[in-house]
C-alpha cells in the first residue's frame, strides 16, 4: 500500500469503509462502491434518517420530503379543555357561584379579557390561584423558577414558533433527555411532538407565570444567537428546496431535519461543528 493511500485511510480502513452509508437516492449517478462512498463522505448530508451523497441527490430527496410535509394534514391542535378556568376554580372551592356569575357578567360587559383576570380584578382570587387552575385545566404542573434558566442553543426553537405557540424552553434534564416546555396558557401537544422529532429528546409540558415567561424570553434574546431565518412569503416545494439547498451548501450542513408546526415548516441545518441554522417557511397553499 502506498504512503499516499495510507495517509488518507483511517486506522481501520476496511471497517470504516464498510460502515459508510449508501446513498438513498434511487437515481444516484455515482457507483455504490466502497471507495466512492469514502470520497463522498464529506459531501453527503443526512435528511432525517436517510443519507444522500451529493447536493443533487439531497435536493431530490428534499423535494419529496417537502411535498409530503406540505400535503400532510397538520396534527390536531390541543384538545379543548373539559372545564373552563372559572369552573375549575369553582370546583376547587376557590370561588363561589355568585362570584363566577359576577365575573362572567363583567367579562361580557367588557367584551374581552379572560375570566381569571376578571376574578383577580374583583379580588375573588389571586393570580397564583388562577395559575394553578390553568395548570389543572391543562393537566400539567406550574413551573415557577426564581431565576430564568440558561439552556444550550440546540434546545431552542425559532422565535417565530415561540410567538405562535407562546412556548419557551425552561429546564433540561440531560440524564433523562427530558426538556420541560413552558406554555403561557394553552399546551399544544402537536407542537410538543414536533419539538421531540426535531430536538431528538422527550418533552414535558408545564404552565409558566407571565413574569417567568417574560424573563425567560428576555434571557434567550440576550444570550442566544438567533441563528434562524423566517421566510414570510409562501414558497412552493421547488422554491423551498432551492432555498434550503443553498443554505445547506453555505453552512456545509451534515444533517437536515424538517417538521411541520401547524401552518409552518421548521427546517434545521446542522454542520459538524455543533452549530445550527433554523429556517421557518409557511406551508404552501394547495393548488
Image (cartoon, rainbow, N blue to C red):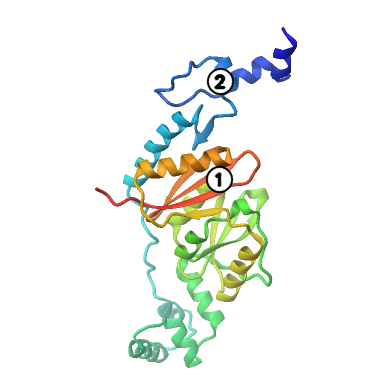
Mark 2 secondary-structure assignment: helix
Picture layout, residue 211 above or below residue 230: below
Nearer to us in this view, 9 or 129: 9
Q: Mark 1 Cα within 10 Å, few/some/many (few <14, many 20+)?
A: few
Q: Quadrant of residue 222?
A: bottom right
Picture layout, residue 261 above or below residue 15: below
Relative image position of residue 144 (x, y in whole percent):
62, 71
Nearer to us in this view, 226 or 108: 226
Relative image position of residue 133 (x, y in whole percent):
49, 75
Q: CA distance from mark 2 to mark 1?
A: 27 Å
Mark 1 secondary-structure assignment: loop
Residue 147, labelled with which disc? none
Taking the image as shown, residue 115 lies to the left or right of residue 199, namely left
Residue occupying the far left of the picture: 287
Relative image position of residue 235 (x, y in whole percent):
36, 49
Q: Quadrant of residue 62?
A: top left
Q: Name which of mark 2 and mark 1 comes first in the sequence.
A: 2
Residue occupying the far right of the picture: 3
Residue occupying the far top of the picture: 1
Q: Residue at x 27, y 49 (%)?
A: 286
Mark nearest the camera among 2 and 1 is 2
Taking the image as shown, residue 53 lies to the left or right of residue 241, namely right
Q: Residue at x 65, y 20 (%)?
A: 16
Viewport quadrant of the N terminus: top right
Q: Mark 2 Cα within 10 Å, few/some/many (few <14, many 20+)?
A: many
Relative image position of residue 125 (x, y in whole percent):
51, 87
Picture layout, residue 172 above or below residue 111: above
Please give the residue where the numbered disc 2 appears in the rendered image.
37
Nearer to us in this view, 126 or 164: 164
Residue 200, labelled with which disc? 1
Q: Residue at x 53, y 75 (%)?
A: 132
Amino acid at each position: 500500500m502506498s504512503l499516499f493511500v495510507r495517509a488518507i485511510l483511517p486506522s481501520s480502513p476496511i471497517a470504516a469503509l464498510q460502515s459508510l452509508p449508501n446513498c438513498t437516492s434511487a437515481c444516484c449517478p455515482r457507483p455504490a462502491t466502497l471507495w466512492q462512498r469514502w470520497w463522498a463522505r464529506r459531501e453527503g448530508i443526512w435528511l432525517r434518517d436517510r443519507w444522500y451523497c451529493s447536493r443533487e441527490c439531497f435536493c431530490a430527496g428534499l423535494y419529496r420530503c417537502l411535498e409530503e410535509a406540505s400535503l400532510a394534514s397538520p396534527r390536531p391542535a390541543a384538545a379543548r379543555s373539559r372545564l373552563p378556568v372559572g369552573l375549575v376554580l369553582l370546583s376547587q372551592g376557590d370561588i363561589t357561584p355568585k362570584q363566577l356569575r359576577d365575573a362572567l357578567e363583567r367579562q361580557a360587559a367588557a367584551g374581552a379579557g379572560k375570566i381569571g383576570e376578571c376574578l383577580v380584578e374583583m379580588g375573588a382570587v389571586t393570580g397564583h390561584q388562577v395559575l394553578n387552575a390553568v395548570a389543572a385545566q391543562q393537566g400539567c404542573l406550574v413551573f415557577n423558577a426564581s431565576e430564568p434558566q440558561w439552556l444550550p442553543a440546540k434546545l431552542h426553537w425559532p422565535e417565530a414558533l415561540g410567538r405562535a405557540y407562546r412556548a419557551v424552553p425552561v429546564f433540561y434534564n440531560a440524564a433523562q433527555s427530558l426538556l420541560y416546555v413552558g406554555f403561557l396558557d394553552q399546551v399544544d401537544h402537536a407542537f410538543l411532538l414536533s419539538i421531540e422529532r426535531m430536538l431528538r429528546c422527550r418533552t414535558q409540558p408545564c404552565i409558566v407565570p407571565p413574569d417567568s415567561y417574560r424573563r425567560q424570553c428576555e434571557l434567550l434574546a440576550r444570550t442566544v444567537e438567533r441563528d434562524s431565518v423566517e421566510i414570510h412569503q409562501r414558497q412552493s416545494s421547488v422554491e423551498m428546496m432551492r432555498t434550503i439547498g443553498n443554505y445547506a451548501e453555505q453552512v456545509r450542513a451534515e444533517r437536515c431535519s424538517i417538521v411541520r408546526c401547524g401552518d409552518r415548516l421548521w427546517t434545521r441545518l446542522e454542520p459538524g461543528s455543533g452549530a445550527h441554522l433554523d429556517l421557518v417557511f409557511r406551508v404552501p397553499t394547495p393548488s
